[in-house]
Image (cartoon, rainbow, N blue to C red):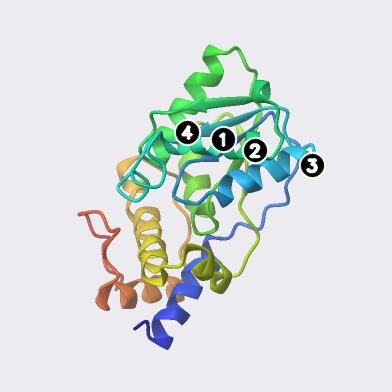
Amino acid sequence: MISTQARADAQRLWDYQQMHHEPRPCSVGIGLGSHDLGVADTTVDLYRRGMMPLIVFTGATSRTTQDRMPRGEAEHYRDRALELGVPAEVILVEPHARNTGQNITLSRALLEQRGVDVASVLLVSKPYEERRAYATARKLWPDVSFVSASTPMKLSEYFDSIEDERLVIEMLVGSLQRLLIYPAQGFSIAQDVPGEVFYAYERLVAQGFTGRLVSISPTPRG
């Protein structure tokens, strides 16, 4: 049973991850692989709106996706885009990335190999990964302008779409932890984390939503 407090704290983390960037035309759109096919749907919608002439789908498999996307996240995203009518020639697939950093570095390498001139990227992620994806991309590809985007939806709607409340909350906790600790490791730029967000994160960890934490913990605030 998920408590009312846990849902409220999850909402704080969800709201914080939203960047509220206004989509604008970019050189390329990069759809970050995950368990959520909504990322592919949103990337297709942005393509149809003329926000990018080229799409890169990036992602291998993870413990969350190995059963539902056995051929790799990027390949399944590509299939979804083709089903929705996107021409095959505007889709590139990067099938090896296993984390957000690799999503960025391997997509960059693929585009360089193809001779694509990239000045700006529309970065499409899960709703609770917007800020972390942006912070990672800014660190690893600093000479490019990034716009962060995701499927516009409420947390309650996302719970319903994934059908696993605990998994979603654990993903939120894991994403916030990485946002806290990765700047010191050189994986992302630092983001200001308001106290109420940090303490919501701490409460969720204390309640056992730890399934997506990495081993290094952030330094507690005084």
Between the residue at mark 4 and the residue at mark 3, the CA separation in whole angstroms equals 23 Å
Mark 4 or 2: in front is 2
Residue at which label 3 appears: 49
Q: Residue at x 35, y 40 (%)?
A: 186
Classify residue 26 by image quadrant.
Answer: top right
Please report contact status of discs 1 and 2: CB closer than 8 Å, yes or no.
Answer: yes
Q: Which of these two is toward me, 98 or 69?
A: 69
Residue at which label 1 appears: 79
Q: Which of these two is toward me, 80 or 144?
A: 80
Between the residue at mark 4 and the residue at mark 1, the CA separation in whole angstroms equals 21 Å
Q: Which of these two is toward me, 143 or 59?
A: 59
Between the residue at mark 4 and the residue at mark 2, the CA separation in whole angstroms equals 25 Å
47 displayed left or right of 158: right
Mark 4 or 3: in front is 3
Between the residue at mark 1 and the residue at mark 3, the CA separation in whole angstroms equals 20 Å
* Depicted 43 relative to depicted 176: above or below: above
Q: Residue at x 54, y 16 (%)?
A: 112
Residue at which label 4 appears: 104
Label 3 is placed on what type of residue?
Arg
Badge 3 local density, few (<14 within 10 Å), some, or many (20+)? Answer: few
Classify residue 193 by image quadrant.
Answer: bottom left
Residue at which label 2 appears: 83
Label 4 is placed on what type of residue?
Ile
Please report contact status of discs 2 and 3: CB closer than 8 Å, yes or no.
Answer: no
- Relative image position of residue 185 (x, y in whole percent): 30, 43
**How many callouts does the rendering have?**
4
Q: Earlier in the sequence, mark 4 or mark 2?
A: 2
Q: Residue at x 43, y 28 (%)?
A: 95
Q: Earlier in the sequence, mark 1 or mark 3?
A: 3
Mark 1 or 3: in front is 1
Classify residue 221 by image quadrant.
Answer: bottom left
